[in-house]
Image: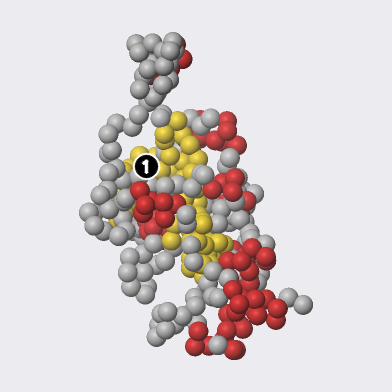
Amino acid sequence: MGAGEDQGTKNRSGITPSTTTQNMKNTTQFLPGNPTHNAEATPWKRDRLNNYQDLVLKPEFAERKLRFQTGETWLRILPAFQTSVHGWMLGVHALEFDGGHFAHPRTLMRNAKSVFDHAYTWALANKPDSLYSKTNKAGVRLLTNPLGVFWALIEENGKTVARLFVGSAYDGSRGGTPGLAWQVWHLTQQKDENDNLIANPAHPDEGVLICVEKTQAAGAKYPSYRLQLGRQKARITDSIAKMEPGEFDALVPLEKTIRVLTPDEEWECLGKVMSPETAGIIKNSVVK
């Protein structure tokens, strides 16, 4: 021990306790155990998942993406804005690339073209065997996948917060499980024996909560979800009344939350779907 050091006042790390560090001991909060432990979700697997480039939402809204925890999540669908041309759920055409996806520009602009459209036309004319098909599943896939986006109000620590649900809208017609966005949409369209809606979860006054229960079986690659409608009316004004000003101010029409990539950004994404050399040839044939 060096000169002037007091063994009773320094811990093993060499940091001298003070009033500040003592207070930290009293105020620091830790998660109670590991309630969502999953033996398959190692730190390295989580890191790979976190590297996924979800470019559908604008950066300022990306942190508001709703991420379901294991167990039940009750949410209130935010009704459509009067100033918006879209309903409470926005249908997004998503283009996939190695490590992420983004919104096709026709999501917001009808008949808009994407770099991927030019690439598909070029490949169809020059290398049709390179394209994805039922018989060539290893081919390049340049077509879109459907997503559903909507505002969901959920309760955290007794306050209502605004989250953006982003999920697959695949309807299951080609086999497999329908996407979660499609399941939510289907739930809101269910009718009784008199052909009347059982509930209208997106109605401002008559709407009810929706419960999304997430489960993850041991060893399963993907989680499963069970949905159900609440029974009591949940007026949207009551939910909004519990929101902090910053949460309420975040609510904007859905079209204002969607990110539209620049052509250069799209070309970069295309280079992650096919070889950068081929993407460059296509770009030179398009960009004059």
Q: Is residue 53 above or below residue 38?
A: below
Q: Nearer the viewer, residue 234 or 64?
A: 64
Who's the residue at 33% across and 65% down the image? 177
Q: Is residue 9 above or below residue 157?
A: above
Residue found farthest to the left: 218
* Residue 250 place in picture, x, y as percent: 58, 40
Q: Nearer the viewer, residue 202 or 167?
A: 167
Q: Is residue 73 in sight in this rendering? A: yes
Q: Residues within 10 Å of mark 1 (few under 14, many from 20)?
A: some
Q: Is residue 25 above or below residue 225?
A: above
Residue type at mark 1 is Trp
Q: How many labels were placed on the picture?
A: 1
Who's the residue at 58% across and 71% down the image? 271
Residue found farthest to the right: 288
State left or right for residue 230 relative to residue 243. left
Residue found farthest to the front: 3
* Residue 270 place in picture, x, y as percent: 58, 70
* Residue 142 place in picture, x, y as percent: 53, 75
State left or right for residue 257 relative to residue 16. right
Who's the residue at 64% across and 63% down the image? 265
Q: Which residue is mark 1?
A: 74
Q: Nearer the viewer, residue 152 or 285?
A: 285
Q: Is residue 118 in sight in this rendering? A: no
- Image colouring: secondary structure
Image quarter in which the N terminus is found: top left
> Residue 249 lies in what quarter of the image?
top right
Q: Secondary structure at mark 1?
A: strand
Who's the residue at 67% across and 65% down the image? 264
* Residue 21 place in picture, x, y as percent: 43, 17
Image quarter in which the C terminus is found: bottom right
> Residue 35 lies in what quarter of the image?
top left
